[in-house]
Amino acid sequence: MTGSTHRTSAVSLWLGAMIVTALVGIAGFSMLPGGVDPTFIHVAEKLRPPSSLHWLGTDHLGRDVLGLTMQGAVASLAVAVMAVVIGAGIGVPLGLIAAAREGWISQAIMRANDFIFAFPALVIAILLHETMGAGMLNAMVAIGIFNIPVFARTAYGRAQPIWTFDFIRAARLSGKGDIEIALGHVLPLVMATIIVQATIQLGLGILAEAGLSYVGLGIVPPTPSWGRMLSEAQTLIGVAPRLAIVPGAAIALTVLGFTLLGDALSERVDPRRRGR
Amino acid sequence: MLVLDIKNLSLSIANDEKLSGVSLALEKGRILGLVGASGSGKSLTTRAIMGLPPQGASLRGEIMLAGRPLLSLDDAEMNQVRGREIGIIFQDSASAFDPLLTVGDHVAEPLRHHLGLDRKAARQEAQKALDRVEFPTTIDAFDRYPHEISGGQRQRAMIAVAVALKPKLLLADEPTTALDVTTQAAILDLFKRLKEEGMAILLVSHDLPALATIADDLALMEKGVIVETMATRSLHDSVGTKLAALFASAIPGKASLPQEGGEAVMTASHLSYAYGKRRVLNDVSFTLRQGECIGVVGESGSGKSTLAKIVTGLAQSFSGHLNGPKRVGSVQMVFQDPIGAFNPRWQLGRSIAEPLGTRLETPDESNRRVVEVLAEVGLGAQFAERYPHDVSGGQAQRAAIARAIIAKPDVLVLDEPVSALDVAVRGQILELLDKLRVRHGLAMLFITHDLGVARTVANRVLVMQSGSVVEEGLTSDLLTSPSHPYTLSLVRASPKLGI
């Protein structure tokens, strides 16, 4: 554990933060009024190679690929963020309750989480598809449910040892109840880890959204989505490979950004991974 | 013959001199006790001898092992010296063993590695080493894993590993700190016998009274410098030396203990507690009166901590009767690990004010009370804004006491409040507790494994063994004429009593 790990971690942090900031910037920029509407279909302009008008060319319906990709970031982020909000909003309280109440309550909560964890987001999405149809909400809820056990476990794992510390006993002797202790002492100590986990889940959420949209369970046309761009590009891969490469690279780069950021943050938060 | 001869050893890390001009000499068949507060450089010295200084450390001076300069050896040569010629014993026997190897395998490993013995021969030699350290013969070491034996037995096994190759020098860094008092005495006894066999032993400890019972010579280290050396037998007549002062402060004089009397603030009758089927507390009764301090003495696992949990209301499902003050916050507690007793993200002032809860209306009033109690425990007002990790253990324990008294409790439960502290600080904390008891008429339940500590603060003592009270009475009576054999063994084992 020497300076070199610290340097690597600093590079990851910097690079990850840059990619994520750029992504958010692009998503915001693409929503500004007055730009080209990338969902505008102009079949006569289909499959144009990159030009000064269409920097990354057009797809099989004549839509601007750059614009589609930029707006795709909006859907990706929206789904990933909401999924994290759902997952953390339900998972963290569950984990905190499980840690506070050792015994059957804790067992029940954590085993229920294991049960949910056993189902991939894809299966949950298919299930939801049957009841509410495809769409952004479907993707958010499906990935959100998948996120619940992740956050519950993280919160539980961090919170549980905290309950054995003497300062918790001191707080009890001060007349504080479980809820006061959980919110006043435990949650703030768990928070840093939760934020790290949220960053990692954002990356995974974007990947999951792309996957769901790819198989038609996520975002529906005309809203641009990286996953659907990929699936539409599939048949044209021989004619215009850039149609697959552009959204694919966008997905890879985004996930990489969040992963680097999350990893670097967790190194800062977790003393076991911090250099001595 | 000089086994270890350190001349003018200096060690610096990034231009920060951690050891300077350390010189020590140790002859065959003698024990040198190296004393000092934590952070004084004791452990760095042993690490330098082992050839395992921290990364980036630069060493100057000379370390001679039986005439051989260790600092000029390369890694491969040093590997031959370590284990073979220098035996090493660590403080924490739990983490020094590989959990997947049996105890016997650990002892046999250096024999196979250094002497190239085959499996069978190594096993025989290992058994001899285990016999030498009096590892219980009822336990088949080759059949047991480290977690299956007790801490004392593990410590014995680790000594067996260290002495199996009959090294010239034995380095022991705080070898008894983690052990309870009877086991500690037995291990110290073992060191004495190894010394008589001709081994040279460097014993590092912050516990001077324990060291003084077996060491031939003592060296005191402060801030990386050896400030004093003397023969142990002259300790008692060298008034004015730092070592003598340290020794005296570790054995504070008898406190001004109150007479019997005062109102009963807590009555416990026939308390029992079980974890599942395992009974950890068995029919314990006592009456605690205002202004008195009851010492609860026993080894780890005797039920002391369970008793503390019940008395403070942290364990509910006990049987028997407990009649104590009902007001919230009227029973407070001081813990063993002062740093862990505070939320690491909270300033000390916020933690100290916690027992006040919402009883005080304004933050100003609460801040005033915090400053008041800080002053009472001998800390300045600025400590309210410090964090637990940047105060010393002694200061943190004072802050913990401040938190315990801020809501004016009737009963204070102290769970080994000084055993994690340096010897020099111990006396001060005990004195502080005594002062507070007298001033506020506090009733105290003082839990300790150390009879020497109990003697200085408690007017009555309960001696506990495996969950039951085996003897109780006035401290003075109990120490001079213990009637239960277990109490007797505790009295004998306590190096600080000198009885």
Image: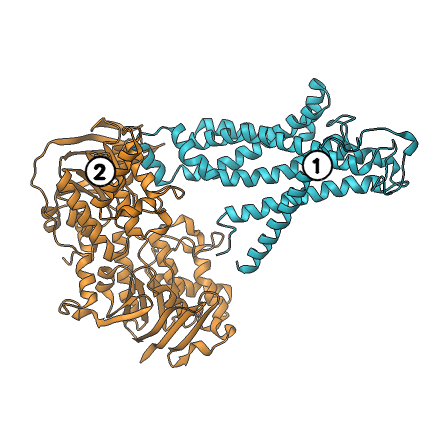
Chain colours: A cyan, B orange
Which residue lies most toward the top here? A131
Measured from the top left, where is residue B89 in percent x and y? Answer: 37, 62
Crowd class of label 1 (few under 14; some 14 to 19; many from 20; radius 10 Å): some
Query: Based on the displayed image, in which of its 4 quarters is residue B171 positioned?
Result: bottom left
Residue B206 appears in the picture as rendered: yes
Using the image, tell me which numbered label, if any, was put on residue A29. 1
Q: Are marks 2 and 1 in contact (CB under 8 Å)?
A: no
Query: Which amino acid, by three-letter code, is at mark 1?
Result: Phe
Query: Which amino acid, by three-letter code, is at mark 2?
Result: Leu
Identified at 19% across, 39% down, the residue is B444
Chain ID of residue with mark 2: B
| Alpha carbon separation for disc pair 2 and 1 | 63 Å
Measured from the top left, where is residue B291 in percent x and y? Answer: 13, 38
Crowd class of label 2 (few under 14; some 14 to 19; many from 20; radius 10 Å): many
Using the image, tell me which numbered label, if any, was put on residue B412. 2
Chain ID of residue with mark 1: A
